Amino acid sequence: MPEQKVMNRSLVVVGAIMIQLCLGAIYAWSAFTKDLVDAGWTKTQTQAVFSAGLATFAVVMVIAGRMMPKVGPRKLAIAGGLVLGAGYALAGLVGGTSFGMILLLVGFVGGAGIGLAYVVPIAVGMRWYPDKKGLITGLAVAGFGFGATIWVKLAGNWGNLLATYGLSKTFTIYGIVFAVTVCIGGIWMMFPPEGWLPAGYTPPKPAAGKSTGAVDFKSGEMLVTPQYYMILLCFAFGASAGLMSIGLMKLFPMEALQAAGMSKEAAAAVAGTAMGVFYALANGIGRIAWGSVSDKLGRKKSIMIMMATQGVVVFLFPWMAGTTGLLYLGATLIGFNFGGNFALFPTMTADTFGTKFVGQNYGWVFLAYGIGGIFGPMLGGKLGDMKNFPLAFRICAGLCILAAIIIALVKPPQKAASTAA
């Protein structure tokens, strides 16, 4: 079907980035952990809130994928923004430094809001840009990575929100900003007309009996294939390494730098820069870069390279963290590779199981993120309380290498003759 006079598809990218900038607040959690530890929290408690948010995010995303055909992407995105904003705003108004209230409002409520909205820009973007799925998915989720930089630095030395207003008011300010911004970005979240294609684009023809992104698997069909579980496991291992690193990117380097002779204040500044600038910026850039690279190399080969590289860097990170330059390099490489997960696994899902149902199917694949969000940060927190941060990095490095091997074994699934629910 030739190109029609429809909405300018570049507006989808603008809306997607606005939404994802706010959803990336979950990666800025480390900005608050030091103040919470000073208020009496254990390291494990700080990671419990982070893990609760990640796990809720992943579970609710499955529900959101099923809701999207019924309520539409625009309403779903706006609902997510309102729930996310309410969680943070209420945490500021009634939570204080109460572990239980912040766990509930920032962890579970905030995580639910992120889960409702996250899949919308991905599914909408792929439908508007079938010719550039990797690049557009990378752009759509880049805001999630860049958002961490904005919210960390606004809370810290860019905006001095924590120093000026304290934890509670900072949560409230963020909640209001999140709700407003996501609702505005949600205005452009709508699918193109059925059958619409960009001018000059011809969809690729699938090989006989196999999926190349033109054959569409429903979720019930996908869930009975071994390819789904291999992709899920690979994503879970990569997510564990990245999310464990995010949770510890300030706490562990502070200890390592002080052990190397740096003052507490200087170590805090260096570790904050590693997380808030180098890791976060690389996380956003990695989403765009890996998405674009995968359009040329293919998804499977790109994931193999990304996971193998991540395994090496994560293994070396305990040694790198005690030296400023090496810490910045390690944070950059881990963030760059971790960001690639969010461009590569949606497109791997679409290439393997089709684009039509990617909103629903990627929700099931994204459960891996919830698994990693529980395992990685809690592993880091527990071993941190046991004074053995390096072991957490080594375990996750091994999982990344294993993920590279697993994804290499994934082959295109056969399309079943019967249909599933």
Image (cartoon, grey):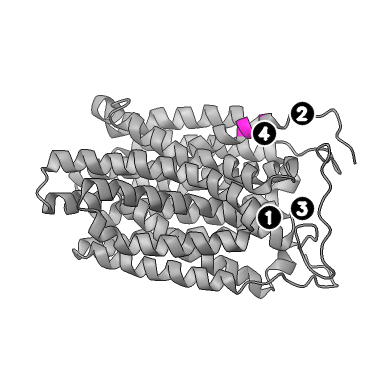
Q: Which residue is mark 2?
A: 7
Residue 396 appears anywhere in the view: yes
Mark 2 or mark 3, earlier in chain: 2
Q: CA distance from mark 4 to mark 2?
A: 9 Å
What amino acid type is highlighted by mark number 4? Val
Q: Quadrant of residue 219?
A: bottom right
Q: Answer with mark 4 or mark 1, whichever residue precedes in sequence.
A: 4
Q: For this view, does 60 lie left or right of residue 331?
A: right
Q: Residue at x 20, y 41 (%)?
A: 268
The residue singled out by tag 4 in the image is 12
Q: Position of residue 406 (x, y in %)?
A: 54, 73
The CA distance from mark 4 to mark 1 is 19 Å
Q: Secondary structure at mark 2?
A: loop
- Closer to the chain start, of discs 4 and 3, is 4
Q: Are marks 2 and 1 in contact (CB under 8 Å)?
A: no
Residue 356, numbered circle: 3
Q: What distance separates the C-alpha of mark 2 from that of mark 3?
A: 20 Å
Say which label, 4 or 2, has the lower sequence index: 2
Q: Does residue 55 appear to the left or right of 187 in the view shown?
A: left
Measured in 3D between alpha carbons, the distance from the residue under mark 4 to the one under mark 3, in whole angstroms, is 18 Å
In the rendered structure, are the residues bearing label 1 and label 3 in contact, judged by CB atoms less than 8 Å apart? no
| SS at mark 1 in the image | helix
| Residue corresponding to mark 1 | 360
Q: Is residue 78 above or below residue 69?
A: above
Give yes or no for contact between labels 4 and 2 (Cβ–Cβ under 8 Å).
Answer: yes
